[in-house]
Image (tube, coloured by chain):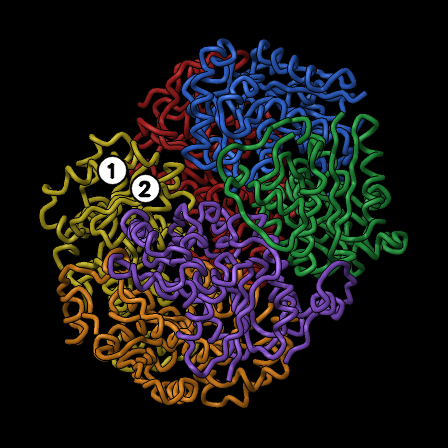
Chain colours: A blue, B green, C purple, D orange, E yellow, F red
Amino acid sequence: MPRILVINPNTTVAVTDLVAEWARALAGSGVEIVPVTGRFGARYITSRATAAIAAHAALDALAEHVAGCDAVFLACFGDPGLLALKELSPVPVIGMAEASCHLACLLGRRFSIVTGGERWRPMLEEFVAELGLSGRLAGIRAVAPTGGEIARDPDAALALLAEQCSACATADGTDIVVLGGAGLAGLAERIAPSVPIPVLCSVEAGLRATLAAAHLQAGKARLGSAAPAVAAVETVGLSEALAQSLLAGGIAPP
Amino acid sequence: MPRILVINPNTTVAVTDLVAEWARALAGSGVEIVPVTGRFGARYITSRATAAIAAHAALDALAEHVAGCDAVFLACFGDPGLLALKELSPVPVIGMAEASCHLACLLGRRFSIVTGGERWRPMLEEFVAELGLSGRLAGIRAVAPTGGEIARDPDAALALLAEQCSACATADGTDIVVLGGAGLAGLAERIAPSVPIPVLCSVEAGLRATLAAAHLQAGKARLGSAAPAVAAVETVGLSEALAQSLLAGGIAPP
Amino acid sequence: MPRILVINPNTTVAVTDLVAEWARALAGSGVEIVPVTGRFGARYITSRATAAIAAHAALDALAEHVAGCDAVFLACFGDPGLLALKELSPVPVIGMAEASCHLACLLGRRFSIVTGGERWRPMLEEFVAELGLSGRLAGIRAVAPTGGEIARDPDAALALLAEQCSACATADGTDIVVLGGAGLAGLAERIAPSVPIPVLCSVEAGLRATLAAAHLQAGKARLGSAAPAVAAVETVGLSEALAQSLLAGGIAPP
Amino acid sequence: MPRILVINPNTTVAVTDLVAEWARALAGSGVEIVPVTGRFGARYITSRATAAIAAHAALDALAEHVAGCDAVFLACFGDPGLLALKELSPVPVIGMAEASCHLACLLGRRFSIVTGGERWRPMLEEFVAELGLSGRLAGIRAVAPTGGEIARDPDAALALLAEQCSACATADGTDIVVLGGAGLAGLAERIAPSVPIPVLCSVEAGLRATLAAAHLQAGKARLGSAAPAVAAVETVGLSEALAQSLLAGGIAPP
Amino acid sequence: MPRILVINPNTTVAVTDLVAEWARALAGSGVEIVPVTGRFGARYITSRATAAIAAHAALDALAEHVAGCDAVFLACFGDPGLLALKELSPVPVIGMAEASCHLACLLGRRFSIVTGGERWRPMLEEFVAELGLSGRLAGIRAVAPTGGEIARDPDAALALLAEQCSACATADGTDIVVLGGAGLAGLAERIAPSVPIPVLCSVEAGLRATLAAAHLQAGKARLGSAAPAVAAVETVGLSEALAQSLLAGGIAPP
Amino acid sequence: MPRILVINPNTTVAVTDLVAEWARALAGSGVEIVPVTGRFGARYITSRATAAIAAHAALDALAEHVAGCDAVFLACFGDPGLLALKELSPVPVIGMAEASCHLACLLGRRFSIVTGGERWRPMLEEFVAELGLSGRLAGIRAVAPTGGEIARDPDAALALLAEQCSACATADGTDIVVLGGAGLAGLAERIAPSVPIPVLCSVEAGLRATLAAAHLQAGKARLGSAAPAVAAVETVGLSEALAQSLLAGGIAPP
């Protein structure tokens, strides 16, 4: 039975619980979901600074909890620390935003993103550029309430989110829209009926991609930039698990 | 139980059977695989001209067989007619090459492709560019035997393919290599032990992505360039099913 | 006396006749125009699916009629099957859209396209990207009537086309506009007086470029991706001429 | 009878004569060729500094000689002052390098350039990038002798040029090679037999494109960045014709 | 004490004086400013043609005046002849526009440009593309009065410039705006209070970058495309200093 | 007197001291250098994981020490946390690598990077892409010893570094090479004599750019993505200074 480590790199347990609940419902009984919440950092990630801290928190969580897992789902739309996690992890790490973008590309020629928190728009534009997918992106629309605020009161945000998703189709000419954010889990299916193009839930996209990655059993590169770092790196002031992982030049495969 | 239409757009039934066998083994008993072979065109696709004809043959097969299916797997690495199929189809169509490239991007920062048939190298470079993924591509290595020839005698090609996959890592600096081609189904796991980076089987990648798409139930766009064409288009000389589909401006959803 | 094969890959003889008439008028008495109409497919090409079928029909026409010709003019704006035709043909093949775009680049820093049929906008955006000319493109404006409808009643469309051409200048900041479509032959000179920038007729641009290609006598590559495919490819269900051409790995030069 | 102004922006009359001779042979008796040589600057253009001066010299020649001409052929491979000439000129100006690159794109998927003078390689890479055609360029090979030196003793350079043209095919994977340089007029047909891909003469390509532009009669934009500058610009120290042209905000159309 | 040659490549001494005054104020007493005005060309540069002539004038000024200087500041926003000057000069040459763009990139993620003279917008878009910085550019806004006109009556333009700078922030989403133009020296600090993002004075940016370059003492390349041209180039009709520099294949380092 | 905060985001005081010493020597007596070392993380940054942790450490240092400073110099070549620091900081933050790349672009058409630690090559390729400068980059050569190892025994690395810098010129065709790394401070001038192109010291480039930024006094954006985040963000487990800064939505300007 595959075990999926779900890392919520912010420090709000309620968001971790929300994602874990949806992940368990989608994955079914044949998959074990292991959720973990960041030990330090912001309650919800809304800026570059809080995302940078979350990258450290995600590495901290990975080092502590990845043993025995078959794949890792980084459950924050924006994927803080994604490449560092892939480097350190002995099993595949799939980010919520990267999975959503790549799956959206399989389902439409051009995709859009709707998310919560206005600071995310430039950050996600850069993220999509790093994926190499800027040419497929029709646009990003970020509503004012953050994902954390939407998670606390989803009903209040539904109309606004549906309006922005529809505008992606009517004004931006996109084929499919990603509704991005851990805190927005489950809202895609509620707004889909009023949107003339498909609406992709980022939590479901991330989970489906992580399961596919677990099935593919692609293994860890033994060479190149995706291979574990081989040199011992001494550190100070980190958690014991993370310090050990870095000292060992990576975490041993299961 | 999801039904997956597997279109082999060349005219060799043995290749269809090979892909169907692997698809059934990977998908398990909870998925129905509906394989279909192109009615006209080349025995194996090895050039731009044969790929162009295969696009027509794939549309022909879709119109005849898609009714009652939940998703379509276009099982030719190079995805002839991909966007036309997506336009006409009432359910998601996933190409073997696009799925392999997008999943490879989730598993490595840079990916390479190894395939059979030297004419495919420039064709696949252009295909990857159309996906928007040129920036993620480390290189394409095409061995001289075509996929059709490899399918007929896989043992003869194993060493050559393994050598090229290893060269992707040692000479091109890639993180993961896609072993592309319907006729190469099942060879990835045989050569993986001798290659220092993960080797992705394009048949498995295509199938996993198609299953994910079937699960996501993203639906068909009612607006935009991915929506069915609405105007009646009269045709001459086509199969009745394809003529009817075009006359109706698309195929009705299930 | 150079002979130019003019392939209309749709199945409407009236459009073939219209293009042939203009081609003869422009080329003068020193050039022989050999027009041919697609044997199967849509009456007018308005979507990705009909374009994919037209690519096959164009190959079918080429194999049957290219013998004795010095160059081929693919007379559909969007150039279905262009690269496959270039691969198979023993003489240069020039597409109406590629010729228009490249000549427009010689006449202005940024160019726009106005054409008929709304589905063509994303298709042409991708086509221009494949040419590598996206950076020169100021925009594409597609009016609702298709090229086929405009060909049947050009007077009804003149004002709309002129308005869109002018908008390319005033709103999109372009230097020159291509009026694209076989069915729009001859309309450029009628609307030019009311447009503040040059209006390029795609039929004339295509013909001028084809004549230039015929004069240049550049010959067929004997090496590389533009050389004929050398391997025999068996096929089923194709016209005898096309089947023979593929079996021979290309068509012998004149 | 169309009149074509051929501007050689360097100061070597022998090169002007060579280009004019070829132009007359290619254009036939129905076209009048009006050659002009730069009044100041380098004997042959071999660097950025000499190219910058040649841009001024070309403007100077245009202002003095364009009256009564239907199109202008800027006969230096590298096209010094191209956009400035297009801005100032009342009739189309076609550069030898831009014409060669665009026509090469119609005749092959990827093109290469072989030219004389090592300083031209980075300059032409930037020029091709400005055209937006970097994605179509397979490479540039510049031999040590400059175009001026090759013009003085073409036989001595033939073997070297043929070797580089062949290397474009065998090592760089290109489809067609442009033999670039006014001083190399006529050498393409001499080396073509020993090169496995087509070799395009830049003088012929430039002339064919200029004739096509003259035929198209696209006219001068009355709006936008290609329109004449409308404001009076006072100058000092320029030739009377150029000063008058700038003071008038452009040269009046014929 | 570093000596900075400030080249104003237009022919208006008042603009040279304005730039020199600001340069001296900013650089302080430890730097010697050597201003020089173009000997020929337009009073103010407002078009491609006048910019092309200014490139020659700048080379002419360099050859005459660079001896004994440690760095060169090309004080025209648009940097006519920039790469040619860098090639010929024995010491670093820094253009006002390139310096402004690169420093703006250090101070904001995306930058905009506001300048005088409507013809500059497409010219600067191309210039930024040549720098490779198009991805960082949020937009260019060119007001109708030219830089020369603004220099003669700055008070009349202040409100218009401030309005456009603010629009860069509110409408274009930029982080920092460059106020570009030698004639606009000193206006940035006057309009900054009314603009919600930083306003960078191009004269100050250019000077700061030139001083940094003088300090870095990076030296002249002895190899590659930035090295002096080594071959003797004969010329006609140029100033003696420029002719000598070209004949010597570059100007000897101090 | 300007005060420059120099943040070394690794945890090796000796590297901080080395950078501070060079910074003081270069800046002269009119500038106060305030060096600070990361409180936690790796001894030297050699991988994506250690860089991600360093981003947090740099934010931690900024929050604690920026008060009273005029600009910040992030003294690690690779600039961990750069955009997050710019977001949070009330004064300009300049990264060592971004400064080096932008100044190199002012001094050469194409630049290369030589640095220590093989994992840095792909990381820096991505960093340069994020700057938008990939088109200016000729290549990156990373020697096996890390910057930390080179700092401990620079004499042992000199020959290797000089060899790689020379290869940038002779094999990669670059115009200027950046010798990157805090631990390599001062080595550029030692190897420059044996390298045929300019060698730029990243510590000096970073310092010169930081001083220029301090002089420009561009101020903090009050709008857009570079403005401080305005919403209060609660955090757990961070240093008091950093927690306070995030709770306040940024650090107040001096």
Front-most of C124 and A203? C124
- Residue B242 lies, in percent from the top left, at 65, 46
Front-most of E8 and E32? E8
Query: Seen in the image, is E26 located left or right of residue F32?
Result: left
Which residue: 17% across, 76% down? Answer: D241
Image vertical order of residue B103 relative to residue C15, above or below: above
- Residue F199 lies, in percent from the top left, at 49, 54
The residue tagged 2 is E112
Question: In this rendering, does residue E130 appear at all?
Answer: no
Front-most of C102 and A151? C102
Amino acid carrying label 1: it is Cys
Query: Seen in the image, is B106 located left or right of residue D237?
Result: right
Which residue: 38% across, 30% down? Answer: F226
Parent chain of label 2: E
Q: Which quarter of the image is occupied by the N terminus of chain D?
A: bottom left
- Residue B188 lies, in percent from the top left, at 81, 44
Compare marks 1 and 2 and give the one earlier in the sequence: 2
Q: Residues within 10 Å of mark 2 (few under 14, many from 20)?
A: many
Q: Quadrant of residue C202?
A: bottom left
The residue tagged 1 is E165
- Residue A159 lies, in percent from the top left, at 44, 17
